[in-house]
Amino acid sequence: MQIKLLNYLSVNRTLIRRFWPFGLILLLLFFVYLNSIDNVNTQHGAQCELIETQTCVAALDGREFAGRLLQNPQVEEELQIELIYPSQYDLQQSYIQGINMYMGQTALLNTSMESNAERIISKNTFFLGACSERNMRWQLVLLFVNEASGDEKRVFFNFETQY
């Protein structure tokens, strides 16, 4: 009985010594794969919830309008958001407003824009004011217009700040 157990243990040690590098490589590849998966939240309709720096896509009538905060939103800090939308549309109106407390309208300032035949990538800067409400809900209101067809799309990206 002891001889069988010793033979079993020595065979397992040999297998472990030979194959542990392959197991380690597989484990590393698995973690690389998990980290490479994009966090994209696709929602059908005009409302989209921005969570931290996750991309949110509002799908309207077969068109996709995406937004992504480039850092976690904080009040009284310069913040940046990336907007991606179909190249047939122009961004006609953009502002941020408070949802759970009136804060007026805060302008979105375009800092850079890239375009190709399919889409426009627009980087924008904005500032959020602080108020007595520690947990604030915000809404980015966007109006996109296709001049050729007269089609208008309103998209709303909602997000939160806490301090």
Image (cartoon, rainbow, N blue to C red):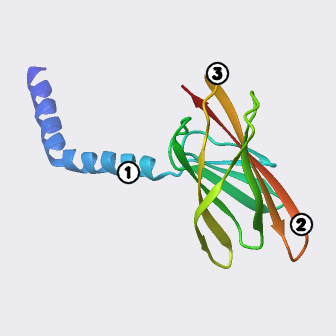
Instruction: Measure the alpha-carbon separation of dots 3 and 2.
Output: 39 Å
Please name whichever residue, 105 or 39, is drawn nearer the observer in this view of the structure: 105
Q: Is residue 11 left or right of residue 89?
A: left
Mark 2: secondary structure:
strand
Q: Mark 2 = which residue? A: 151
Q: Is residue 131 above or below residue 78?
A: above
Contact, mark 3 vs mark 1 (Cβ under 8 Å): no
Q: Mark 1 = which residue? A: 32
Residue 125 in percent (x, y) is at 58, 53
Of labels 2 and 1, earlier in sequence is 1
Label 2: few (<14), some (14–19) or many (≥20) C-alpha neighbours in 10 Å = few
Please name whichever residue, 114 or 78, is drawn nearer the observer in this view of the structure: 78
Q: Mark 3 = which residue? A: 132
Residue 124, image quadrant: bottom right
Name the kind of residue labelled 3 in the image. Ser
The residue positioned 54% from the left and 36% from the top of the image is 74
